[in-house]
Amino acid sequence: MDNTFLSPYFQQPLALGADIVIHSGTKYLGGHNDVLAGFTVVKDRELSEKLKLIYKTTGACLSPMDSFLTLRGIKTLALRMERHQENALELALWLRNHSRVSEVYYIGLPDRPDKTVIDSQCSGYGGMLSFRVDSPATAERLLKEVKLIRFAESLGGVESLLTYPYRQTHAEVPEELRRRLGVDDTLLRLSVGIENIRDLTEDLEQAFQAAAGQGKGNADEMVPCAAG
Ligand SMILES: *Cc1c(COP(=O)(O)O)cnc(C)c1O
């Protein structure tokens, strides 16, 4: 079970019956877009010993600096997750009322159809959401026009990052499957950071307005930032 998006703060899969849990420490655990790390957490002691042996003999371990950054990040995990979630819910509701947005996907929305299942598994909803805009041109212009929010692929850090799954995270997925999964060229993913919520809504609003004013964008000009 990959528990990266909710982090151990909001969901503990071992307690729900999972045998092996993985986390990208690069995301919420580190939390500042400045470290690459990963974790495998297992229930069974024997399996844990086997993994420890592989870890020790292959030597693919975290460096002291990366360990330090990850441990320091974890000290504020609780505070950050609460704020990510608070901002994400406000933004989800704000986006839902926006005339250029046709759909908002956030597990913390009170009227989610799968809310009963969600609430039986986790104690919170985290900061990841996605939304669908009225056209591919709007999606492309938004990516260019956001100023505080950055167009980049990672997630889980204190800064808000906007991603275009169709061209980035899911670019390698066959077109037919992408369409079936709803990952089309109008879908944007937002990793909501811990900024002031008004700064986030103002940034999105100015980007929507700029997108409306400047006509069709050219996807070839889109240059994502390096994360961090
Ligand atoms: C980023 C990510 C990974 C991979 O983690 P890295 O730290 O980039 O190696 C795995 N699962 C999820 C859900 C992720 O977001």
Image (spheres, helix red, strand yellow):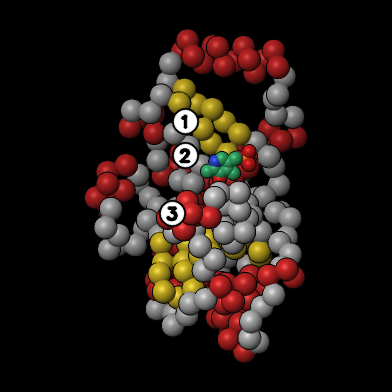
Rendered location of residue 114, percent (x, y): 28, 53
Distance CA(mark 3)–CA(mark 1)? 24 Å
Farthest residue to the left: give it.
116
Q: Amino acid at mark 2?
A: Asn
> In front: 197, or 88?
88
Q: Amino acid at mark 3?
A: Leu
Distance CA(mark 2)–CA(mark 1)? 7 Å
Q: Amino acid at mark 1?
A: Val
Q: Quadrant of residue 35?
A: top right
Residue at x 51%, y 32% (from the top left corner)? 22
Instruction: Report whether the residue tagged 2 is closer than 8 Å to ligand 1.
Output: no
Rendered location of residue 189, percent (x, y): 53, 61
Residue 21's disc is 1
**Dividing the image into 4 quarters, which one contains the C terminus?**
bottom right
Does the CB distance between marks 3 and 1 fall below 8 Å? no
Residue 34 appearing in the image: yes
Q: Which residue is mark 2?
A: 3
